[in-house]
Image (cartoon, rainbow, N blue to C red):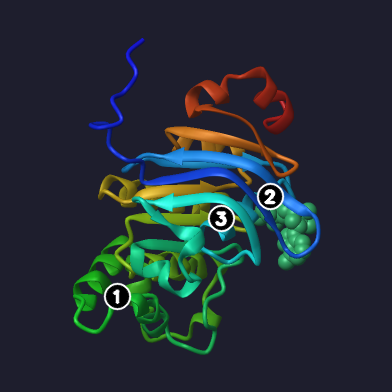
Amino acid sequence: MMTPDPQTAPAPLLAVEGLSASYGGAWVLRDVSLVMQEGEFLSVIGANTAGKSTLLKAISGLMPKVEGRITFRGTDLTATPSHRIPSLGIAHVPEGRHVFPDMTVEENLIAGAFARGTDAAIGDTLAHVFDLFPRLKERRRQLAGTLSGGEQQMVAVGRGMMLDPKLLILDEPSLGLAPMVVEEMHDRFHEIHESGVSVLLVEQNVSLALESAERAYVMSSGEIEFEGVAKDLANDDRIRKAYLGI
Ligand SMILES: Nc1ncnc2c1ncn2[C@@H]1O[C@H](COP(=O)(O)OP(=O)(O)O)[C@@H](O)[C@H]1O
Ligand SMILES: [Mg+2]
């Protein structure tokens, strides 16, 4: 097998190496390593409390204590203040949506562009987000708190897209949504990916996560258990028994 020449091989988009993280007490992530290439659609799956959200938070600089290395296009994220991370092109859509309920849909979206500075083409990006989610255009003047769960998730994803990100991080975007809405959301994630944005998805719905992604990592008790091509994992007996109930 040929080893890629480190001089010419493209640097990965994101590289997590030997990452441990804690909220102040015990380590909840231990020695996690993960690599993501430019343009990839990657999923992280695993049982509840496996550490998936913690991993995403560590990437976004939101964990109080980390050891190890996280680099994004060569920039060391563990040495970057968390408020600078969005301006590198990383949009994190957190679990639970967290829209501003008393602001309109449009105000919520514009708030997502905060890290781009004042001269960015925010109007063009807003038009792009409205193309992606026409429902949000119809409801642009409505208070976000009055929207359905699915619509609020669209606001949360749209707000991330307002950053014009290189990497879109999605934490449990289909939690609590009706199956039809979940499918529609995933169609939008594909559209976003097709447009050139790399996507890192954490998803409770394992079959959907493996259908959507090109590759996936499986986490268990704060560690990476295994990783592979998503299609292969979907046919792997260990995954089928533990996560798909078949
Ligand atoms: N804010 C917090 N403070 C302390 N412990 C936390 C906090 N959030 C999560 N944890 C713990 O970290 C572990 C991993 O949680 P989490 O990353 O949320 O898992 P997942 O997203 O896979 O369900 C769990 O044991 C959880 O109890
Ligand atoms: Mg979680």
Of the pair 49 and 24, the residue shown nearer to us: 24
**Picture coordinates of residue 43, whole percent (x, y):** 51, 41
**Which residue is tagged 2?**
51
Kind of residue at disc 3: Leu
Q: Which residue is mark 3?
A: 56
Query: From mark 2 to mark 3, how far is it between C-alphas?
Result: 9 Å
Which type of secondary structure does the marked residue at label 2 adopt?
loop
Q: Earlier in the sequence, mark 2 or mark 1?
A: 2
- Residue lying at 33% horizontally and 69% vertically, measured from the top left: 163
User: x, y (%) of residue 98?
Assistant: 57, 74
Assess mark 3: CB under 8 A from ligand 1? yes
Residue furthest to the top in view is: 1
In the image, which disc is placed on residue 85? none
Q: Is residue 15 above or below residue 9?
A: below
Residue 183 visible here? no
Residue at image coords 36%, 46%: 13
Kind of residue sitting beneath label 1? Arg
Which secondary structure lies at badge 3? helix
Of the numbered discs 3 and 1, the one sitting upstream in the chain is: 3
Marks 2 and 1, how far apart in space? 30 Å
* Horizontal side, residue 10 vs residue 83: left or right: left
Q: Quadrant of ligand 2?
A: bottom right
- Residue that numbered label 1 is attached to: 116
Q: Of 156 and 185, which appears nearest the observer?
A: 156
Left or right position of 92 against 140 = right
Inter-mark Cα distance, 3 to 1? 21 Å
Ligand 1 has an atom within 8 Å of the beta carbon of the residue at disc 2 = yes
Q: Residue at x 29, y 75 (%)?
A: 116
